[in-house]
């Protein structure tokens, strides 16, 4: 055997400086610094100047605390919107924003003052607000740098802040539009109130948690009734809020509910000593129950009787033998027959408020789902209670103060009673607490147990329970007709009819305009339309006022009769002052200045409440999209994007504010995402130790890994993240990175041109057809903001169509064909097209990696993020034919694998394969199949099975293929022999 030559240096292996190991945590900050140095955001604005606009308006997060994983997902999705629309050739400027007013910040500042032992109430308002402003600015700066690290493309040098003087002035101006149109009123209604924070709350500031409450049955003696049998009986109410009994003013029944007057008989087996305290206590508990009758809904008689039986038993000994013997019915009838019936409060002996009669009133809201079928009414503390009592001339008494305690002069549990506590205090409402104890002493407490489990509203900030509390507040009416003909609205192209309807002089209500807009706006996913629609359809009037210090003031001057001044000149002076000085401008010392010569300051009071922060954020479209500070913005926005909780938050407040002032929504589409859960699908909580810190993830993996995760999950639903999930994303990233590494290496030194696509090899035509198909699908995914599908299609194309198929087949051609090979040049031309397409497709997802790949190939080619969507050849191929071929290829691979495992063969190149002739698509020769299947040979047989044997051919010393033209192992095949001859003749050992 002759000595074999080493052909290693004659093989055209890929060459690139693009490393396999990404090193993203170290590399990404350097890329960020380069973008900052070249001012990439402004460079992009200039490049897209005069292009079609696309406006995504940013929903403002609170400037309070570090970025968490939910922030990261939200911002990555927004960045994907901006970058993908930019890639599609549009001008998509993005102004990030922050919500800077409100309780979260005010609370933190109060904590700081408490540490300094300073009482908030003793601190000048201007000093307190200055501290709030500084605290908010600190966190804006912190969050801004954290968000930049994610690789976001935004105007971070000029964000919008709700506390900017211009923003505060615009919020005031928007409020004045409501005032001047008469769309504000002050009224007393029960609103969600936080006794801990001492302020009203919006629905969006409330979350529900499961709790266990005290449930009680209380007897109200009937003193008057057109039904003689009921006089002297006791109407029984059931409640889980014992604290509302001291403010009771009436009872409600269901007009169509069946009721019965019953007496209870118990079978008692109790062995207690005569004269003992236990016997005396038991006798007291039993006496009232056994010697009186009770009015209860028929359907609920048995469950009521069981509650009181258990109460009697528990009062002595839970193991005592007390069973229900019988129930005696002395009257039965419908609720409507109870009209005119009057009861008295169990604490009537206290006189005053408690001595007033308690009428029984018909209430359509009364059901027999639970309780007794009778509901006690406290107009101060319930919406149904308020409306029903007001209908009958019964007004709130404002017994509960802002801190949740009964007011000092209240007859029961007022300041003179040292048992007084906040009404949300659990012990205060307990079976042995002061309310139950006094009712028991009065002989009116039939049962009390601390075991009722239910969902109850809590403040999402303080996590404390909230109550309904009737207080004077400022409201926007939902059902008052608006003069919609006065709206000055620019009608977007394509929505003429819809806006014409919304802005015609039809005197629609705010609710009607908002509901029409909900029908017009596009929602992604569609279920968002139903969600916000049901909320707006049933929501009460919009409560605007808050009793706090850090926020935009309700800049109204109110007369003694409760009416407010509607003077545009006065309002303009106030707006101008706020624009110059911020919210501190609303000060009593400037009252006369604002009112001017036409109004007597003595006739007006300045409102001291501030605006709900949801009104603030609902106005962001006005000062950001319409303001002069960001001239590249425009109103309305194409898209709003936030979490699904914002259907009752920012989406809704923006909709209502804009509908009332402009007759339409400030957006044309809404995209919502779900919440990020831990790896087991549980809600993240610091107390559970299952939180994922995006800053730490970036330190370990890099921002592109978080981005790939965020854009791979179905973000429209709740989704998961965890270490194992991130490792899986990391594997996915590495495959994408290796695709770029292969492309860059294979294109080293490439300057070719494919020419006429009709003349290229069929495999190249097929891959270009796949690319064209991918291109269309990716565009469609972007059109519907389906980023999960976009990312999945991109990953699958790189993994399945390229790495596992096309690259695998053509690596022999790339490595071993000669430099002048038509097939090799065609392959590299297609790789060039693939690189230009894929680096652009990947750019909105892997912002750093795409930039690295682009600049590796084109060091002086600028940023990949300045490029437009790729121009892909419109090549077609017989997809069904190639699908059949790839299916057969998979069968061949599966048939080879057992021989590889038992080491009969070491690679598919050593396999001779016989395939079913019927399975081979038309137009492929056996030589084509061997190349496509990467085997020594392929022949066709009559069997339906694929059979594999080890070839007897020798192995080429250069390309390693086993072919008939190779005389012995290590000798050259005909192809390699020709290439080496050409290279030797040229005196070259490489391309």
Image (cartoon, rainbow, N blue to C red):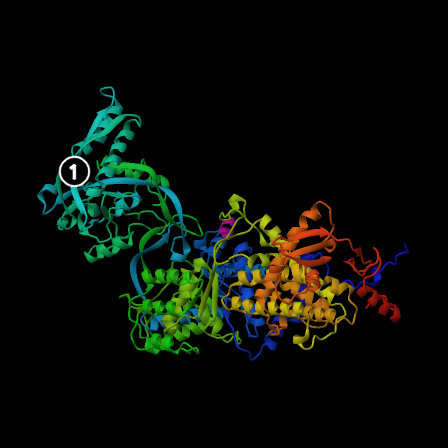
In the image: residue 852, left or right of residue 590 = right
Nearer to the camera, 103 or 129: 103
Residue 50 x/y as whole percent:
56, 80
Q: Looking at the figure, which quarter contains the N terminus?
A: bottom right
Question: From this viewpoint, which residue is outermost toward the bottom?
Answer: 50
Residue 403: tell me if it is visible: yes
Instruction: Tell me what residue is drawn at x 20 percent, y 33 percent.
Output: 289
**Residue that lies at the very extreme toward the front in this rendered image:** 942
For the C terminus, the quadrant is bottom right
Whether residue 112 is in magenta: the answer is yes
Residue 810 percent coordinates (x, y):
71, 63
Position of 812 with respect to 679 (left or right) is right
Q: Is residue 15 visible?
A: no
Whether the magenta-drawn stretch holds residue 365 is answered as no
Image side of residue 606 versus residue 395, left or right: right
Q: Return the residue found at the far top.
A: 273
The number of discs equals 1
**What are the residue bounds of the magenta stretch?**
111-116
User: What secondary structure is found at the residue carrying circle 1?
Assistant: strand
Picture layout, residue 337 above or below residue 515: above
Near-viewer residue (624 or 46): 46
Q: How far from the left and from the top, in percent, is residue 323? A: 24, 29
Residue 879 in which image quadrant: bottom right
Whole-percent x and y of residue 638?
47, 71
Q: Which residue is mark 1?
A: 262
Residue depicted at x 71% and y 55%: 912
For mark 1, does the 10 Å Cα neighbourhood hold few (<14), some (14 to 19), or many (20 or more) residues?
A: many
Q: Main secondary structure of the magenta part?
A: helix
């Amino acid at each position: 055997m002759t000595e074999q030559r080493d052909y290693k240096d004659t093989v055209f292996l890929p060459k690139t400086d693009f490393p396999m190991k990404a090193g993203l945590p170290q590399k990404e900050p350097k890329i960020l610094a380069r973008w900052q140095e070249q001012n990439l955001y402004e460079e992009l604005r200039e490049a897209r100047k005069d292009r079609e606009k696309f406006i995504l308006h940013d929903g403002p997060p609170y400037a309070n605390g570090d970025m968490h994983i939910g922030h990261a997902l939200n911002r990555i999705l927004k960045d994907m919107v901006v970058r993908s629309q930019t890639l599609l050739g549009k001008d998509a400027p993005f102004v990030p924003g922050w919500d800077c007013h409100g309780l979260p910040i005010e609370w933190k500042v109060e904590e700081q003052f408490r540490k300094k032992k300073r009482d908030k109430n003793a601190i000048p308002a201007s000093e307190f607000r200055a501290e709030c402003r500084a605290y908010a600015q600190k966190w804006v700066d912190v969050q801004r740098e954290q968000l930049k690290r994610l690789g976001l493309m935004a105007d971070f040098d000029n964000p919008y802040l709700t506390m900017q003087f211009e923003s505060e002035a615009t919020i005031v101006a928007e409020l004045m539009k409501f005032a001047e149109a008469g769309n504000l009123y002050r009224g007393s209604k029960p609103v969600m109130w936080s006794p801990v924070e001492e302020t009203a709350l919006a629905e969006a500031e409330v979350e529900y948690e499961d709790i266990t409450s005290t449930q009680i049955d209380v007897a109200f003696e009937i003193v008057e009734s057109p039904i003689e049998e009921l006089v002297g009986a006791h109407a029984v109410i059931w409640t889980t809020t014992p604290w509302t009994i001291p403010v009771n003013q009436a009872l409600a029944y269901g007009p169509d509910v069946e009721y019965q007057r019953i007496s209870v008989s118990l079978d008692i087996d109790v062995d207690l000593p005569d004269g003992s305290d236990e016997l005396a206590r038991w006798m007291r508990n039993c006496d009232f129950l056994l010697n009186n009758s009770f009015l209860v809904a028929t359907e609920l008689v048995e469950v009521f009787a069981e509650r009181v039986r258990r109460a009697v038993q528990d009062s002595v000994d839970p193991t005592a033998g007390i069973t229900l013997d019988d129930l005696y019915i002395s009257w039965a009838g419908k609720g409507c027959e109870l009209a005119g019936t009057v009861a008295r409060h169990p604490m009537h002996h206290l006189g005053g408020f408690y001595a007033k009669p308690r009428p029984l009133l018909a209430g359509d809201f009364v059901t027999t789902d639970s309780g007794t079928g009778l509901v006690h009414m406290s107009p101060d503390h319930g919406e149904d209670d308020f409306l029903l009592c007001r209908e009958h001339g019964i007004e709130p008494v404002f017994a509960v103060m802002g801190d949740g305690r009964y007011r000092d002069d209240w007859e029961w549990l007022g300041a003179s009673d040292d048992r007084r506590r906040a009404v949300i205090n659990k012990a205060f409402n307990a079976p042995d607490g002061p309310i139950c104890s006094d009712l028991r002493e009065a002989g009116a407490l039939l049962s009390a147990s601390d075991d009722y489990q239910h969902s109850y509203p809590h403040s999402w900030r303080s996590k404390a329970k909230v109550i309904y509390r009737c207080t004077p507040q400022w409201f926007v009416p939902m059902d008052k007709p608006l003069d919609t003909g006065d709206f000055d609205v620019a009608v977007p192209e394509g929505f003429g009819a819809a806006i014409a309807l919304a802005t015609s002089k039809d005197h629609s209500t705010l609710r009607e305009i908002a509901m029409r807009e909900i029908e017009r706006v596009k929602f992604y996913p569609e279920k968002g339309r139903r969600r916000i629609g049901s909320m707006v359809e049933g929501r009460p009037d919009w409560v605007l006022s808050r009793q706090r210090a850090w926020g935009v003031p309700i800049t109204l001057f109110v007369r003694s009769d409760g009416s407010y001044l509607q003077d545009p000149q006065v309002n303009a002076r106030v707006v101008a002052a706020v624009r110059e000085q911020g919210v501190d401008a609303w000060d009593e010392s400037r009252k006369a200045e604002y009112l001017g010569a036409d109004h007597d300051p003595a006739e007006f009071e300045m409102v001291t409440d501030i605006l709900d922060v949801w009104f603030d954020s609902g106005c962001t479209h006005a000062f950001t999209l319409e303001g002069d500070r960001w001239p590249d913005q425009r109103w309305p926005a194409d898209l709003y994007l936030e979490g699904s909780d914002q259907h009752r938050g920012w989406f809704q407040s923006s909709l209502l504010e804009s509908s009332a002032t402009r007759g339409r929504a400030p957006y044309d589409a809404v995209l919502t995402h779900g919440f990020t859960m831990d790896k087991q699908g549980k809600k993240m909580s610091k107390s559970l130790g299952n939180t994922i810190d995006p800053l730490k993830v970036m330190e370990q993996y890099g921002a592109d890994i978080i981005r790939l995760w965020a854009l791979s999950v179905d973000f429209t639903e709740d989704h998961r993240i965890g270490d194992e999930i991130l490792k899986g994303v990391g594997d996915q990233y590495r495959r994408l990175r290796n695709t770029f590494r292969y492309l860059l290496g294979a294109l080293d030194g490439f300057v070719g041109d494919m020419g006429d696509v009709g003349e290229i090899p069929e495999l190249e035509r097929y891959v270009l057809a796949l690319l064209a198909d991918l291109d269309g699908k990716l565009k469609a995914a972007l059109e519907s903001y389906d980023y999960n599908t976009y990312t999945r299609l991109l990953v699958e194309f790189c993994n399945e169509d390229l790495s596992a198929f096309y690259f695998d087949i053509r690596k022999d051609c790339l490595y071993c064909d000669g430099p002048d090979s038509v097939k090799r040049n065609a392959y590299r031309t297609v790789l060039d097209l693939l690189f230009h397409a894929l680096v652009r497709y990947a750019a909105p997802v892997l912002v750093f990696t795409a930039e690295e790949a682009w600049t590796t190939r084109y060091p002086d080619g600028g940023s990949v993020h300045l490029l437009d969507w790729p121009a892909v050849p419109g090549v077609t191929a017989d997809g069904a034919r190639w699908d059949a071929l790839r299916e057969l290829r998979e069968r061949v691979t599966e048939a080879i694998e057992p021989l590889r495992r038992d080491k009969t063969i070491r690679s598919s190149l050593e396999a001779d394969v016989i395939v079913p002739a019927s399975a081979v698509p038309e137009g492929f020769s056996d030589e084509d199949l061997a190349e496509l299947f990467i085997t020594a040979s392929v022949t066709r047989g009559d069997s339906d099975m694929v059979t594999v044997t080890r070839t007897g051919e020798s192995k080429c010393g250069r390309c390693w293929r086993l072919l008939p033209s190779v005389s012995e192992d290590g000798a050259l095949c005909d192809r390699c022999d020709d290439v080496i001859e050409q290279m030797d003749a040229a005196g070259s050992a490489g391309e």
